[in-house]
């Protein structure tokens, strides 16, 4: 996910300070990787350099300067283009889960692959339960529920893959062992 476009999207609702953007990001994407304050300000600097945002005002109320940023027309056009662009399905996988299973099998360690797959399955099931509880929380906001649905779908896909892989590893073991 591009933090730049999320910040542009947040600024589309109106001018904000970097501090406010960071907190709005955290509220809007509660299950996303947290955005550090430093990353917010570095990203705002790049967006300003590229003409996508401008400094609307600087507050000096007895503390450090607080710069208010707003979206430019060029920034709105970039945001619109990003929102309209379809995300292509990933052409490759770069997942530690897959890599560990393959490496365990390459080292002819079917027992290690079995143990890893079982432990990973347990971790996925526990995370699935946590997300289901979070989703059913009466105080969960729509962003929490949507993010939980997304993560649950991915965990479900991983669990199906884990079941299939456990079966394949067992079949490989039978083929290799006389």
Image (spheres, rainbow, N blue to C red):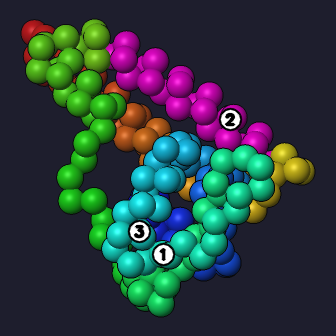
Residue furthest right as drawn: 138
Q: Between marks 3 and 1, how big is the CA–CA gap?
A: 6 Å
Kindly check if marks 3 and 1 are in contact, taking CB atoms under 8 A apart as contact: yes
Circle 3 residue: 47
Q: Sequence-wise, which precedes: disc 1 or disc 2? A: 1
For residue 152, say whether it is visible: no
Image coords of residue 79 (percent x, y): 46, 80
Q: Considering the numbered disc 3 on the image, is that residue within a helix, a strand or a loop?
A: helix
Q: Sequence-wise, which precedes: disc 2 or disc 3? A: 3
Please state the extent of the stretch shown in magenta in the rendering. Answer: 114-136
Q: Considering the numbered disc 2 on the image, is that residue within a helix, a strand or a loop?
A: helix
Among the 4 quarters of the image, the one containing residue 174:
top left
Q: Is residue 16 above or below residue 25?
A: below
Circle 1 residue: 53
Q: Between marks 1 and 2, how big is the CA–CA gap?
A: 41 Å
Residue drawn at (11%, 20%), measured in percent from left and top? 106
Q: Residues within 10 Å of mark 3 (few under 14, many from 20)?
A: many
Image coords of residue 131 (percent x, y): 67, 41
Image coords of residue 108 (percent x, y): 13, 13
Q: Between marks 2 and 3, how big is the CA–CA gap?
A: 39 Å
Among the 4 quarters of the image, the one containing residue 34:
top right
Query: In the displayed structure, does residue 99 sit left or right of residue 48?
Result: left
Circle 2 residue: 129
């Amino acid at each position: 996910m591009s933090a730049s476009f999320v910040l542009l999207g947040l600024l589309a609702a109106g001018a904000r300070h970097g501090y406010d953007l960071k907190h709005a990001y955290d509220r809007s994407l509660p299950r996303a990787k947290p955005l550090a304050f430093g990353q917010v300000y570095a990203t705002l600097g790049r967006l300003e350099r590229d003409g996508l945002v401008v400094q609307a005002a600087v507050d000096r109320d007895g503390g450090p300067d607080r710069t208010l940023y707003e979206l430019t027309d060029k920034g709105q056009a970039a945001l619109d283009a990003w929102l309209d662009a379809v995300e292509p399905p990933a052409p490759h996988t770069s997942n530690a889960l897959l890599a560990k299973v393959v490496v365990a099998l390459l080292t002819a360690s079917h027992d290690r692959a079995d143990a890893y797959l079982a432990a990973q399955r347990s971790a996925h099931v526990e995370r699935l339960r946590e997300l289901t509880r979070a989703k059913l929380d009466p105080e969960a906001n729509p962003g929490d529920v949507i993010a939980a649905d997304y993560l649950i779908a991915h965990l479900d896909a991983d669990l199906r893959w884990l079941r299939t892989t456990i079966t394949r590893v067992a079949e490989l073991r039978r083929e290799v062992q006389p």
